[in-house]
Amino acid sequence: MSKKNKVLSVTVALLLSVMMVLSACTKKENSNSGSSPAAESSSSESSNSSPSETQKPQLDKVTLKFVLLGEAPKDNDAVMAEVNKKLEADINATIELTYIPFADIGTKYPLILASPQDWDVIFGNVSYVSNAAKGGYHEITMADVEKNMPLTHKATSEAMWTDAVVNGKIYMIPQTFKELDVGTGFFREDIRKKYNVPEIKTFKDLGPYFQAIKDNEPGMMPVDGTSDDIKNLFGGMLQGWSAFKVQNLVNFNPENKDYKLTGLLDPEFAAIYTDAAKTMKDWADKGLLPKNAFAQKTSGLDLLKAGKSGYYMTAFENYAQLSSDMTAKGWELGGINNVTPNGTAMIRTATGNGFSFSPISKNYERALMAIDLLHQEPSYNMLLAFGIEGKNYNMVDGKLAIINADPNPYPMYGAGWWSNNRDQWPPLESYTQQYIDTKKALLEKASPYLLNGFNVDETNIKTEVANINNVYKQYAIPIELGIVKDVDAAVAQLVEKYKKAGAQKVVDEVKRQAADFIKSKQVK
């Protein structure tokens, strides 16, 4: 993506600022447009005033119609009453909410987009690229953001704006917090300590821990679960490489800023794959892996919680709850994260949570002002995320304690405001220090990766992908479960089978699409 000054030159920005100040002296905002919060900041007196003092006299009262996903929680009306009280004081606006139930998104979301006069703001991550390309959302320029969203402008990185670009233009205010896209292998830290197993820093380090369980813990498997659970263990040893939906033929890594793609047709990646497979075979030969993974119907998570398995891999965001569950049993949880050898973690695309605007909204600029406050101003942020302090939560020693958690009448993530800046949120009282420290360390080395938001269009390679998937099931899965006799021979056979199934055509097509995707992210 071009830098912001390529979207709006410094000269134009200065000229716009002058025009805004002159306009503020002579105009009152009409009912069809919001006015810039910065328009009255030309003097030191107005710049020291509160939003309500500087903006409300210039802004006509408007009602902003928001469309969210899910269902309104029990205390939603009380929370929104507080939000609207603040918004009316700050920008003379209130919000009217409509919810699309999750089960109805496929049918109702397109109908709402087809009636752009009936809404102003909508949760944007529903076929965002397709809807934006078809004109379903209002284009957002950096001039719009700088004028109406000072907090968002400061909080949003260039990479986050890049994620939101569709064919050279932006149609969403993306999330500004880093959302980790990391798989974590969880194990029993108390058992590791009990048997003096060396510290586990990589997935390969799990071997001595697995052996200690096999030798000393009757009734517990070192690792157990479905075949997918065991394959996830294999994936943790691929040194941070993640695959598209083409079975390790086209993989990407967050440290490759030149967007290098690689896979089993490349000797370098084939060597990484083979090394991981040899570790799995070694563990299987020692009886550390389950022999019945294909037949196992109970998930590794349930087996870990029941004390019948010593390991399970899932997304990092499950760390907090799982750590709390383990602590309640008197156990201690350990985790090893699927990151690169240098410790780089990947973050999800910033369009995972974001808001878009009606292409014909009469309140577009006011809606930008509202989103700026709702997502980035801490008091709004806390209201929308956790409800009303003293009613829904209390702060205890720097941690947030839910007052009525069974059930919570205003649960975190339960009201559809998923774009709030989570970097501002305090830790929950239930969070262990281990989880807090681990997340902090991961975020410090977390990196955005543009291709993490790229999806392969299989239209031109449908037959080849189907053939490759069949090859994967027959030849790759046994390798990844550690049940082949000769790993080198098995990997060589897998590569040859992939080639005969049309792998090179698939690799070439995916690389072409990826290059086009990167070009499409350049702002016009």
Image (tube, rainbow, N blue to C red):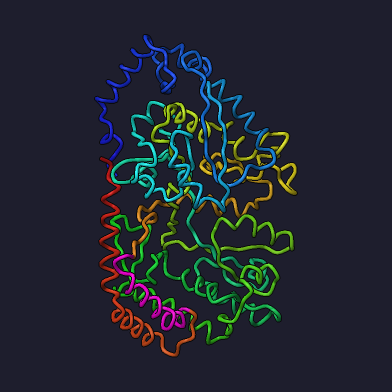
* As drawn, 268 above or below 432: below
Q: Position of residue 92 (x, y in %)?
A: 53, 21
Question: Looking at the figure, which quarter contains the N terminus?
Answer: top left
Q: Residue at x 33, y 83 (%)?
A: 497
Q: Residue at x 58, y 41 (%)?
A: 425
Q: Residue furthest bottom?
A: 485
* As drawn, 58 above or below 283: above
Q: Position of residue 268 (x, y in %)?
A: 31, 72
Give the left or right position of residue 280, taking residue 267 as reference. right
Using the image as rendered, state which of residue 217 and residue 380 is in the foreground. 380
Query: For the magenta stretch, what is the residue range?
Result: 459-480
Using the image as rendered, state which of residue 201 and residue 321 is in the foreground. 321
Q: Position of residue 122 (x, y in %)?
A: 48, 40
Give the left or right position of residue 201, taking residue 269 as reference. right
Question: Looking at the figure, which quarter contains the C terminus?
Answer: top left
Q: Position of residue 7 (x, y in %)?
A: 28, 35
* As drawn, 271 above or below 404: below
Using the image as rendered, state which of residue 145 and residue 361 is in the foreground. 361
Q: Residue at x 44, y 27 (%)?
A: 363
Q: Residue at x 53, y 63 (%)?
A: 184
User: Is residue 199 among what the camera can see?
Assistant: yes
Looking at the image, how many numbered discs can be counted on the residues?
0
Q: Is residue 78 magenta?
A: no
Q: Is residue 472 magenta?
A: yes
Query: Is most of the magenta stretch helix, strand or loop?
Result: helix
Q: Residue furthest top?
A: 26
* As drawn, 46 above or below 120: above
Give the left or right position of residue 381, taking residue 140 as reference. right
User: Is residue 289 among what the camera can see?
Assistant: no
